[in-house]
Image (cartoon, rainbow, N blue to C red):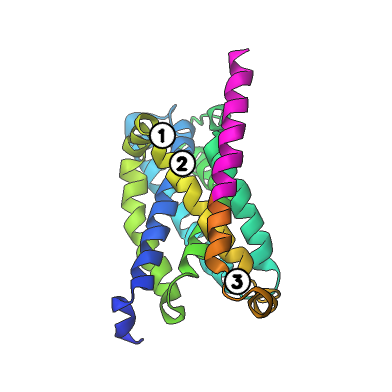
Amino acid sequence: MDFSAFSDAAFWAALLSIIVANILLSGDNAVVIALASRNLPPAQQKKAIFWGSAAAIILRVVLTITAVALLTLPYLKIIGGILLLYIGIQLLSDSDGEEHMKAESSIWAAIRTILIADLVMSLDNVLAVAAAAQKGPEETRLLLLIIGLAMSIPLIIFGSAMLLKVMERFPIIITIGAGLLGFLAGGMLVDDPAIRDGIQNTLGDVKLAFEVVGVVLVILIGSFMKKRNAAKHSD
């Protein structure tokens, strides 16, 4: 590997995006872990949280590496970008439903529940991290994934509860995170191999414009849906 990549601003920007996206999108996973293991004795709770988190993290690393490879195929970045826009809007509109997660009374049942739930819910993390890695130098993308995930793992496991409280106190963090997803989605859409050359030949380098549009779309639509949801709950 060319170690000069470490002095590239794109490397550090991509790494920061990976860490922020992964931490921000792991609050729901932390809630699942807590809910699935809440009926266990304290000693078994710690084991269920550790082994359930470890298995989920390994699964997420494999899925993310696979996603990075798949995003080199035509049209998949377009699909991924649209999904990432949707995930950002959902994050901002706050329409999660993890409170219905079943609490298990067996450590292995709790671990299984954590793993299955994390698999279902990891689409947002996988897409966001893969999109962020794409913004770094090509030869460092796998390393970015490894470093970003490794740095965020202890924060996810030990700091999720604290992070959730901070997000509740400072809602602007959620808005910034949703905007980041919109930014990544816009860049992913315009960078798809199927349309990239055509757009560049016709409009020139408009990647930044697409990224800004992604931010605006997510924040405007997400904020509108959040207000609408709040109005429904107040009725």
Residue drawn 58% across and 27% down?
A: 227
Residue drawn 64% across and 19% down?
A: 232
Q: Earlier in the sequence, mark 2 or mark 3?
A: 2
Q: Is residue 116 something one can see in this rendering?
A: no
Q: Quadrant of the N terminus?
A: bottom left
- The answer to whether residue 47 is magenta is no
- Quarter of the view holding residue 15: bottom left
Count of numbered badges drawn on the protein: 3
Q: Residue furthest bottom?
A: 2
Label 3 crowding class (10 Å Cα cut-off): few <14, some 14-19, many 20+? many
Instruction: Give amino acid for label 3.
Output: Asp
Task: Report the residue marked by disc 2.
Answer: 175
In magenta, the rendered stretch is 216-235
Q: Is residue 46 above or below residue 198?
A: above
Task: Report the residue marked by disc 3.
Answer: 191
Residue drawn 33% across and 76% down?
A: 8
- What SS does tag 2 mark? helix
Q: Position of residue 217 (x, y in %)?
A: 60, 48
- Quarter of the view holding residue 198: bottom right
Task: Report the residue marked by disc 1.
Answer: 171
Residues tagged 2 and 1 counted as in contact (Cβ below 8 A): yes
Instruction: Give the Cα distance between marks 2 and 1.
Output: 7 Å
Residues tagged 3 and 1 counted as in contact (Cβ below 8 A): no
Instruction: Give amino acid for label 2.
Output: Thr
Label 1 crowding class (10 Å Cα cut-off): few <14, some 14-19, many 20+? few
Q: Is residue 215 left or right of residue 200?
A: left
Nearer the observer, 42 or 132? 132
Which mark, by number, is residue 149? none
